Amino acid sequence: MKNFKEIPQPNLKKIDDLQQLHDENQRLTLQNEQLQAKLSWYEEQFRLSRHRQFGSSSEKTAHPEQISVFNEAEMLADKKVDEPVMEDIQYKRRKQKGKREADLKDLPVERVEYRLANDELVCSICDGNLHEMTTEVRKELKVIPAQVTVVEHVRYTYTCRTCEVQEEHPPIITATMPNPILAKSLVSPSLLAYIMNNKYTLALPLYRQEQEFNRIGIPINRANMANWIIHGANHWLKLLYDRLHEILVSKDILHADETDLQVLNEDGRDAHKMSKMWLYATGHTDESIYLYDYRTTRAGKHAEKFLELFKGYLHTDGYSGYNAVGNVKIIGCMAHVRRKYKDALKAIKDQSTTSYAKSEEGLDYCNRLFALEAEWKELTPEERHKKRQESMKPILDDFLAWAKKLKQQALPKSSLGGAITYTLNLWPKLITILEDGRLELSNNRAERAIKPFIINRKNFLFCNTPKGAQASAIVQSIVETAKGNNLKPLDYLSYLFEKLPNININQKEELDDLLPWSDKIPTSCKNLKKE
């Protein structure tokens, strides 16, 4: 029998080694992609952090037609168009007439006249009498620094001399004198208003005010000023604050936001832990009300309690804590969505990448929505609602389809991926704007109102006690509400401190007469020129 060579058997060990190498290669490739994605994400975050620290904070973007920078040349090129003819155009800007007179018309005028003496009213040629022919007027602005005077309130008591002799109990009549803000204290309505205005309108801390008072010879201790503010806020202004709260929750459209505040001496909490200052504001179609509310945390229960009686639409920045508020529909903020795509553009280093172009597309969707809102600004709510259904809804539908498609392609850890995820998560709240023409595309109304508090916080850094923090919330509320109703905070606060101690605080009608939009507010409190 012929011997045949045995059929060679496959080298199983070699095959196992190749499979192992293949698996290892796939693992290393995947790991490399993940590390590259993570590195890109860290680079994006670094560039974004540098931009936030040193770059412009403006959210203004170019015109929508200027967004497509990569295919702009191909889109707009046209060889048939003639070359432009260069020519010099000179013009002189026309000066606006009457502006100075309009700016000065509400200021008191101090007139200083310069005349010739009687013995100089003689003609140098014929010795005849000179008469007035014309005048030359030069206007200047004169500033009078803060002046402090002592006001003595002297109340007289009267009786009858005849009855003193004939009657056992002669009548004693005392003249009426207004009640003070704080008994047995030097603080007056104007002084307390001045201190509050400096601190909450001009962001001037109490220690600087103490220095300034010392410079003009008035030794007012900052501790006294702090006590006066707490008393004036918690004892008097809170009456108006509570009434404004009643009116605010009776509306059906509100805005809300919150920011950090450090309070040093809180029971059971470390000094370094941050508390929160919440802000609630009425919509643009109602009377302007801005109320701050100090709380120890950012828990949604605080918003739920403050808005317990509110029913309607609530504009927010997307924070989930507001979901705890019952009987409301949350309105998402498109400005926050736009900010995400702006941040993605700032974070991406290579502008020729697909990620950069897609970030521009997302930003373009947002800009088109805001352009429409600006165009419809003067429309009635009913007209705006109709326009939104006709023109805004199709853009929103396209935006949603674009985001869903790109969600499958963008890296979740990238800035673009984060912007898309944020958009889709917030989407049900973003499209609620289509339901009512009074609703707004952004929550900028609340963000603008909370900014003065943030500026103040940078100056005084922290509050010492919860009582002081709540007093700050009350005063800031009255100041911002006054500004929102075109009142001068200094004069309005002074007026309130004159009136509040001398009215029946249990009568709602008397409190309503002090509200910023009341026709009982004197003209001297009104800012005839809007800020």
Image: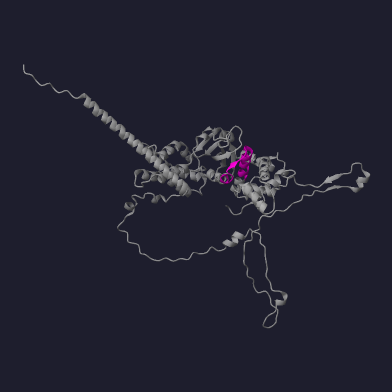
Residue, far right: 166
Q: Residue 137: percent from the left, percent from the top?
A: 63, 68
Against 426, residue 368 (above or below) is below
* Nearer to me, 408 or 222: 222
Q: Judge by depth and name the residue closer to the eye, 111 or 57.
A: 57
Residue 475 highlighted magenta (yes or no)? yes
Residue 60 among magenta residues: no
The relative height of residue 478 versus residue 122 in the rendered view (above or below) is above
Q: Residue furthest top?
A: 1
Would you identify the image quadrant in which residue 18 lies? top left
Q: Quadrant of residue 32?
A: top left
For the N terminus, the image quarter is top left
> Is any atom of residue 173 visible in this view?
yes
* Residue projecting furthest to the left: 1
Depth order, front residue of 436/370: 370
For the stretch drawn in magenta, the main secondary structure is helix
* Region of the chain picked out in magenta, as a range: 456-478
How many numbered marks have been drawn onto this rendered protein structure?
Answer: 0
Residue 339 picture location, percent across and down: 45, 44
Q: Position of residue 166 (x, y in %)?
A: 93, 44
Left/right placement of residue 330 relative to residue 31 reads: right
User: Is residue 365 among the parts visible in the rendering?
Assistant: no
State the image coordinates of residue 204 (x, y, percent, origin top left): 61, 49
Describe residue 293's horizontal placement relative to residue 435 as left or right: right
